[in-house]
Amino acid sequence: MNIVAEIEKENMKEKVPQFKVGDLVDVHVKTVEGEKERIQIFNGTVISKRGSGNRVTFTVRRVVQGEGVERVFPLHSPNIVDIVVKKSHKVRRAKLYYLRDRKGKSARLKEIRRRVKKTVKAETTAPVVVAAEAPTETTEAPAETIKAVKDTNVEAKAKVEKKDEKSST
């Protein structure tokens, strides 16, 4: 491997967010003002991606007060804190430069809606397997205790019914 490739590999980010041309993204950019550092969010549509290795750049376009603003970001820059994909749009081109000439409804892109698969609770919870050396014996409760529990339930229901009759009269 040559020296240039090794140096580029050192400067690349390990975890790069997945986005494509046509996505509506929020780019979190670290800005330095004097001694203070803050994160500023630039949101817009990705209109182009270019380059390879650690030289990958992408252009984000948004319209502010009727004026189009484009900004080019290096993907592997330490000043790019995060890239959040808000929406994805259906595009048929690699570069969306034609959006520069359009205004209003003609500048819209068709959104791709992704369905979220619902998971069943039985699939998400893993069955618990207990390894027992000796077989466990189950003991049944005596019939007297079961009868006592049933009697208390019947008595409780009777009390509730009496209260209902008194309140209705």
Image (cartoon, grey):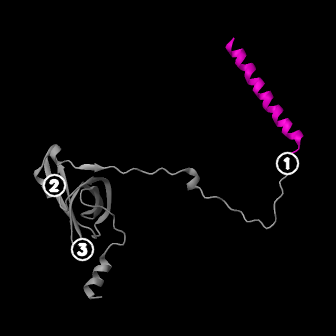
Magenta: main secondary structure: helix
> Which residue appears at 32% of the width and 80% of the height?
10
Q: CA distance from mark 1 to mark 3?
A: 71 Å
Give me the C-alpha separation between circle 2 and circle 1. Answer: 77 Å
Q: Position of residue 156 (x, y in %)?
A: 77, 28
Graded by Cα atoms within 10 Å as few (under 14), some (14 to 19) or many (20 or more), the crowding at tag 3 reads few
The foreground one among 55 and 126 is: 126
Closer to the camera: disc 1 or disc 3?
A: 1
Image quarter for residue 2? bottom left
Residue 18 screen position, x and y as percent: 33, 63
Q: Residues within 10 Å of mark 2 (few under 14, many from 20)?
A: few
Residue 77's label in the rendered image is none
Farthest residue in the top direction?
A: 169
* Amino acid type, mark 2: Val
**Residue at the limit of the structure toward the left, as seen here:** 101
Q: Magenta stretch containing residue 165, yes or no?
A: yes
Q: What quarter of the picture does the C terminus occupy? A: top right
| Badge 1 amino acid | Glu
Instruction: Kindly identify the residue that appears in the image at 30 percent across and 77 percent down.
Output: 11
Residue pointed to by mark 1: 140
Front position in the image: 102 or 167 = 102
Q: Which residue is mark 3?
A: 52
What residue is shown with label 2?
A: 69
Q: Nearer the viewer, mark 3 or mark 2?
A: 3
Q: Quadrant of the N terminus?
A: bottom left
The kind of secondary structure element at disc 1 is loop
User: Tags 1 and 3 in contact by the CB under 8 Å rule?
Assistant: no
Inspect the image, locate mark 3, and give the three-letter code of the amino acid beneath it.
Answer: Ser
